[in-house]
Image (spheres, grey):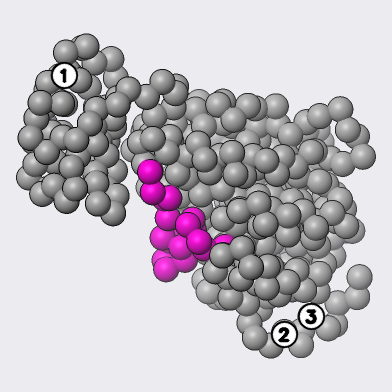
Amino acid sequence: MIVITKNNEPEERILEIVQHIERAGVQAHVSRGTDRTVIGIIGKAEPTLAEHLRQMKGVENVIKISKSYKLASRDFHPDDTIIDIKGVKIGGDNLTIMGGPCAVETQEQIDEIARLVKAAGGQVLRGGAFKPRTGPYSFQGIGVEGLAMMAEAGRKHGLLTITEVMTPEYVDVCCEYADILQVGTRNMQNFDLLRKLGTVKTPVLLKRGFSATYDEFLNAAEYILAGGNPNVMLCERGIRTFETYTRNTLDLAAIPVLQGLSHLPVISDPSHGTGRRELVEPMSKASVAAGANGLIIEMHTDPDNSMTGDGVQSLFPDQFAKLLKELEQLGNLVGKRFDTPKEPAAYFTTWIK
């Protein structure tokens, strides 16, 4: 259930309602909107609780939510969630660009790419230190050393950092180095990991499982929210279909669907969503046109020789810079705020596709 208060109820009244809910043996999660406050009730409540709440002063309505996910639902939180990380706002009308390599390889590599991401206008440096790979003999990442390398590159160039966390045991150490933790498609229903992420406050980018429904995806987000971490982003990264020409099928419809069902920011991953470099640019633009709150894009200085072997889906630096300039123009048309440098960095002219 959710409890909707009347306009501009004082904090003391909200506290009284919360205390009444908790005395009934269930949890109360408060979401403050522009005018009204919504209090979500989590747990099995007695049927009489709803009637008691309706009679309380300051309560406008009590509504039963039929969805299996509550805290992730827009019914619970009507306004868009905007996550502020060191001044970078993700969600709402903001368009956030995350760029970088699939994996951190060396300090020189990640430092150079961080400089290029910043020069192009990106706000977040992406890079994996731990890599879940389909085959056990593939490059698995360089671990904590890679986290330190990326953190240093981010600090040097004024970028936030995002990296993938694979197990509950590594959540705390990843929180020490990274500003955003990424949950990969294979771990979307790793419930032990999701529960652990609910105990920290570091923002989480949750990628959709390659065979997950919207309902399953939002229930995975619910695990993190229910644990106490409100800073969750949803990432559409493509689903597995019968088509083999592309690595995955990027579900563009997921962007407006998820934004209708949930208040959480929705990020699109056109790199994994297509697996083909020539498709990253058009699908990035399509994602922004569909309303995405951000993009996470692979970019590498030498993608054809990357250690992960995923270079076929990585942009060259000049392609990345050109795309971001065009996304700025597109953002203006669809009501998204995104500012890139007014003059392109001369450094990009040295890169030949």
- Residues in magenta, as a range: 78-95
Q: Which mark is residue 348?
A: 3
Q: Secondary structure at mark 3?
A: helix
Quick one: quadrant of the C terminus?
bottom right
Quick one: quadrant of the N terminus?
top left
- Dot 3 surroundings within 10 Å: few (below 14), some, or many (20 or more)? some
* Alpha carbon separation for disc pair 2 and 1: 63 Å
Residue type, label 2: Ala
Q: Is residue 335 left or right of residue 105?
A: left
Contact check, label 3 and label 2, Cβ < 8 Å: yes
Q: Secondary structure at mark 1?
A: helix
* Alpha carbon separation for disc pair 3 and 1: 64 Å
Name of the residue lying farthest toward the top? 47
Dot 3 or dot 1, earlier in sequence: 1
* Residue position marked by numbered label 2 in the rendering: 345
Q: In the image, what residue occupies the spot 91% across and 75% down?
A: 352
Q: Is 135 one of the magenta-colored residues?
A: no
